[in-house]
């Protein structure tokens, strides 16, 4: 645990200015996507998301998290997601046009990275040993919000990567005492249902076994099970904190 928080402190102390720049650019591009979604803005956002993922892979994991075990594998994970954004840009898979659906939930997720530092402060942490807006889980939740708000055709591979990362993040609550990661883990449950429901419905005209209706029902059950598991984990974690 000491190594984990030491790497976070070193990263925040060295990159706090860069994190502010990333946050400002994200806010500007997001505002332009909502107000003036020109093709150049969509391209800029995809390039920015690729850069953000490569930053997490190269700077966060390969530079400042090198003392951690498996840092190379986690860097590869985020580098692949950065590559997915580049691939998405090249083939124009997702246009990043506003969908008009799930607006409230999407806006909540898009602003949630700003909540991470306040959650850390509320838990008694202080800079630089705290969670910040440009860290893996905060970037993941921002990406989920972006996909909900602007992707009519969800990149199902990217969605699966993000949902997998949320499950990984859940383990950090136990091992490193980061309840802030519940922000990502809990938001993933409804997002997971929405992503895969849209994917199933988009392919509903194709013959499949089981049918699209059955798949939709199975997906709902799966998300309910995951939600119950997250709730149980949260309550158990609160009991752990109360014993400290």
Image (cartoon, rainbow, N blue to C red):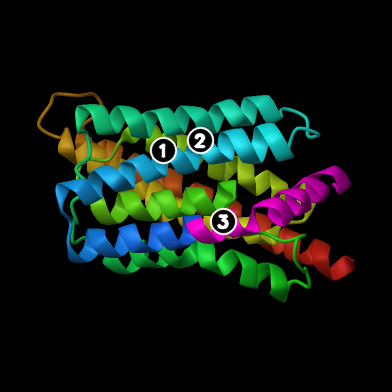
**Residue tagged 3:** 19
- The residue lying furthest to the left in this view is 205
**On the image, which quarter does residue 111 sit in?**
bottom left
131 and 12: which is toward the camera: 12
Residue 50 bears which disc, if any? Answer: 1
Judge from the rendering whether residue 140 lies leftward or rightward of residue 44; answer left or right: right
Q: Quadrant of the C terminus?
A: bottom right
Contact between labelled residues 1 and 3, with CB atoms less than 8 Å apart:
no
Q: Secondary structure at mark 2?
A: helix
Judge from the rendering whether residue 238 lies leftward or rightward of residue 151; answer left or right: right
Report whether residue 228 is seen. no
**Residue tagged 2:** 54
Q: Secondary structure at mark 1?
A: helix
- The residue lying furthest to the bottom in this view is 122
72 and 45: which is toward the camera: 45
Contact between labelled residues 1 and 2, with CB atoms less than 8 Å apart:
yes
Depicted 21 relative to depicted 214: above or below: below
Say whether disc 3 or disc 1 marks the residue closer to the N-terminus. Answer: 3
Q: Secondary structure at mark 3?
A: helix
Report whether residue 165 is seen. yes
Q: Which residue is depicted at the point 59% across and 50% down?
A: 135
Please say whether residue 20 is one of the residues in the magenta stretch.
yes
Extent of the magenta region:
1-21
Residue 210 at x, y percent in the picture: 26, 28
Residue 204 at x, y percent in the picture: 15, 35
Please say whether residue 28 is one of the residues in the magenta stretch.
no
């Amino acid at each position: 645990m000491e190594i984990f928080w030491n790497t976070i402190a070193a990263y925040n102390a060295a990159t706090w200015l860069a994190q502010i720049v990333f946050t400002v650019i994200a806010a500007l591009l997001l505002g332009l996507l909502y107000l003036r979604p020109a093709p150049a803005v969509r391209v800029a956002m995809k390039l920015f998301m690729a850069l953000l993922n490569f930053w997490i892979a190269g700077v966060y994991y390969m530079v400042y998290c090198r003392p951690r075990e498996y840092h190379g594998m986690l860097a590869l994970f985020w580098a692949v997601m950065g590559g997915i954004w580049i691939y998405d840009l090249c083939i124009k898979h997702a246009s990043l046009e506003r969908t008009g659906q799930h607006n409230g939930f999407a806006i909540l997720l898009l602003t949630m990275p700003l909540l991470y530092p306040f959650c850390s402060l509320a838990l008694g942490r202080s800079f630089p040993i705290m969670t910040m807006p440009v860290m893996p889980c905060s970037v993941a939740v921002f990406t989920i919000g972006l996909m909900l708000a602007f992707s009519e055709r969800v990149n199902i591979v990217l969605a699966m990567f993000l949902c997998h990362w949320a499950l990984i993040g859940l383990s950090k609550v136990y091992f490193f005492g980061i309840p802030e990661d519940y922000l990502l883990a809990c938001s993933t449950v409804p997002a997971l249902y929405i992503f895969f429901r849209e994917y199933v419905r988009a392919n509903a005209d194709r013959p499949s076994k089981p049918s699209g209706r059955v798949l939709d029902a199975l997906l709902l059950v799966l998300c309910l099970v995951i939600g119950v598991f997250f709730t149980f984990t949260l309550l158990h974690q609160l009991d752990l904190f109360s014993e400290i």
